[in-house]
Image (cartoon, grey):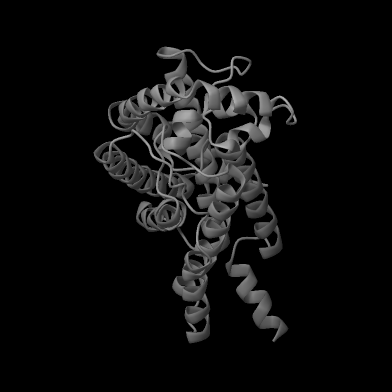
Amino acid sequence: MAFHQTSSGAAAPATTSLSIAVQAGLAVLLGILILGTVGFSHVEAFHNAAHDTRHANAFPCH
Amino acid sequence: MSIFRSIVFTAVAAGLVVGLIVTAIQHFGVVPLILRGEVYEQAAEAAAPVAMADSHSAEGHDAQGHEGQGQGGHDHGAEAWEPSPGLERNAFTAAANILTAIGFSLLLGAAFALRGKAVTWREGLLWGLAGFVVFMVAPGLGLPPELPGMPASELGPRQAWWIGTVVATAAGLGLVLLKRTPWAAVLGLVLIVAPHVVGAPAMLDEATNVPESLVHQFVVTVTLTSFLFWVLLGSLSGALYRRFSA
């Protein structure tokens, strides 16, 4: 059983699934941070700067 | 951190290209409609100076007026910075579009990495179509794209419903399409329908001068532009992720 796991692991890249999950999770967090600032921030200057983008993406606005 | 780097490189490259293309399309499609909506919005504000004065004095008591945006009035307060019309405003719109595309592409890249299968432009396109359903169609059913000048309820609850709907629809679609068991399909379908059973925050029944035809044209244009955005972003992200992760 252990042998099977080793051989199937060798066929895949050396990156572990935990490492993949952590890196994908970091990318998701970064994406949410950017989208939250551009599309959802209540700071008026951000709202005004991204005004047309918010309306064009149907983000709740005003 | 090679996977993270692949996702970020993909997102920046795809976001730049798609953000600029969509900005050009919006310039001739959505933006003129927004500007026409703002004419009605400003006319309504000018016609109701007492109400505006009231809302402005009320904002003075709020914490820096952040909640003021949720009070229905479109906040072009004298103290708030905003880009000047024309080139500056368009430049900020382009930057915001590029950042939006980068943000969504980061989510797509994370999905590619978690799936762990080789991605081509075609898988990317399918993920992009899913993104269109999750981020435009599902929240748009309850909260249609808004034109400036249309009466809108308080901002906070609408944002909360939008986010909840996106999360539930993404989880639901994932369960239906990626798991192959009946219970997952049933749970997924329930998750997709649930936000609409709960219902979006009610729209205000206030009278508006914005013509119905303009609103309809805006909704169609926004939805089509978004469709194109997701098709381009999905397929380009798929193609680039394949290249960067090779």
Work out whether residue B33 or residue B176 is closer to the camera in this orientation and state it.
B33
Q: What residue do we see at 36% from left, 23% from top?
A: B39
Query: Where is residue B93 drawn, in percent x and y?
Result: 46, 26
What is the number of callouts on the image?
Answer: 0
Quarter where residue B138 is shown: bottom left
- Determine if residue B174 is in view: yes
Quarter where residue A34 is shown: top right
Q: What residue do we see at 34% from left, 41% from top?
A: B222
Work out whether residue B235 or residue B35 is closer to the camera in this orientation and state it.
B35
Query: Where is residue A25 drawn, in percent x and y?
Result: 66, 54
Query: Where is residue B173 drawn, in percent x and y?
Result: 47, 67
Q: Give the vertical position of B182 relative to B169 (above or below).
A: below
- Most distant residue in the front direction: B50
Q: Is residue B150 left or right of residue A25?
A: left
- Determine if residue B116 is in view: no
Query: Where is residue B45 drawn, in percent x and y?
Result: 46, 24
Quarter where residue B66 is shown: top right
Q: Is residue B37 left or right of residue A29?
A: left
Q: What residue do we see at 50% from left, 51% from top?
A: B108
Q: Is residue B28 left or right of residue B168?
A: left
- Most distant residue in the left direction: B213
Q: Give the vertical position of B104 relative to A51 (above or below).
A: below
Q: What residue do we see at 50% from left, 75% from top?
A: B190
Q: Give the vertical position of B207 relative to B64 (above or below).
A: below
Work out whether residue B56 or residue B21 is closer to the camera in this orientation and state it.
B56
